[in-house]
Amino acid sequence: MISRKIFLECIKSIEKQFSIDRKCSEAFKVILPNDYTTTYDNSSIIDTFIKLLKELTKDEDEWIDYYIYELDFGRKYKYGMVKFNGKNIKLSTYLDLWNIITKKK
C-alpha cells in the first residue's frame, strides 16, 4: 500500500503535468498551426503512472480514472453526482479521492 502523503503528491503531480501538457499543446497550435506530425505526448508515462497508483491502492473500482478524467481532478464535481453504498460522497479534492479508495476496504 502507498502512503497517503505519497499518493496525494502523485495525484498533484499528474494534475500539474496535465496543465503543462495543455499549455504546450496550445502553444504548438500557435507556433506550428499547419504541422500535423510534431507531437508532444506524455500519455504513455502518465497512463503507466496512473496504472501504478491504481495497483498500489487496489483501486479496482477505478475511482482514480473517474476523478482525473470525468471529474477533471474534482473541478466538475457537483453534490449528489457520486454515490458509494447508497450515500452521497464528496469527490472534489485529492484527499476525498484518497478517502473513497481507502475507506472502502
Image (cartoon, rainbow, N blue to C red):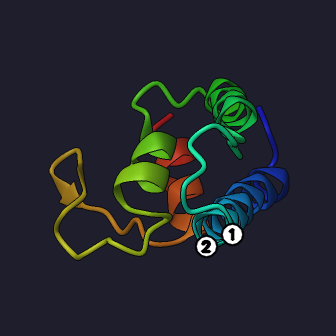
Residue drawn at x 44%, y 69% as measured from the top left: 74
Q: Name the residue under label 1.
A: 31
Q: Quadrant of residue 79?
A: bottom left
The correct choice, above or below, for 78 with respect to 43 in the image is below
Q: In this view, does 73 lie to the left or right of 38?
A: left
Question: How far, Cα to Cα, is label 1 from label 2?
Answer: 4 Å
Q: Where is residue 33 in the image (x, y as percent from the top left)?
A: 56, 62
Of residues 58 and 67, which is closer to you in this image?
67
Q: Where is residue 41 in the image (x, y as percent from the top left)?
A: 68, 41
User: Farthest front residue?
Assistant: 34
Disc 1 crowd, CA 10 A, few/some/many (<14, 14-19, 20+): few
Q: Is residue 64 left or right of residue 15?
A: left
Q: Do callouts 1 and 2 mark residues in contact (Cβ within 8 Å)?
A: yes
Residue drawn at x 31%, y 63% as measured from the top left: 89
Q: Position of residue 36 (x, y in %)?
A: 56, 42
Amino acid type of the residue that numbered disc 2 sits on in the rendered structure: Val
Say what secondary structure mark 1 lies in: helix
Amino acid type of the residue that numbered disc 1 sits on in the rendered structure: Ile
Disc 2 crowd, CA 10 A, few/some/many (<14, 14-19, 20+): few
Residue drawn at x 69%, y 69% as measured from the top left: 31
The correct choice, above or below, for 72 with respect to 63 in the image is below
Q: In this view, does 24 lie to the left or right of 103?
A: right
The correct choice, above or below, for 82 with respect to 78 in the image is above
Say what secondary structure mark 2 lies in: helix
Q: In this view, does 93 lie to the left or right of 78?
A: right
Q: Name the residue under label 2.
A: 30
Q: Where is residue 73 in the image (x, y as percent from the top left)?
A: 50, 64
Residue drawn at x 33%, y 72% as measured from the top left: 76
Of residues 14 and 21, which is closer to you in this image?
21
Of residues 42 and 75, which is closer to you in this image?
42
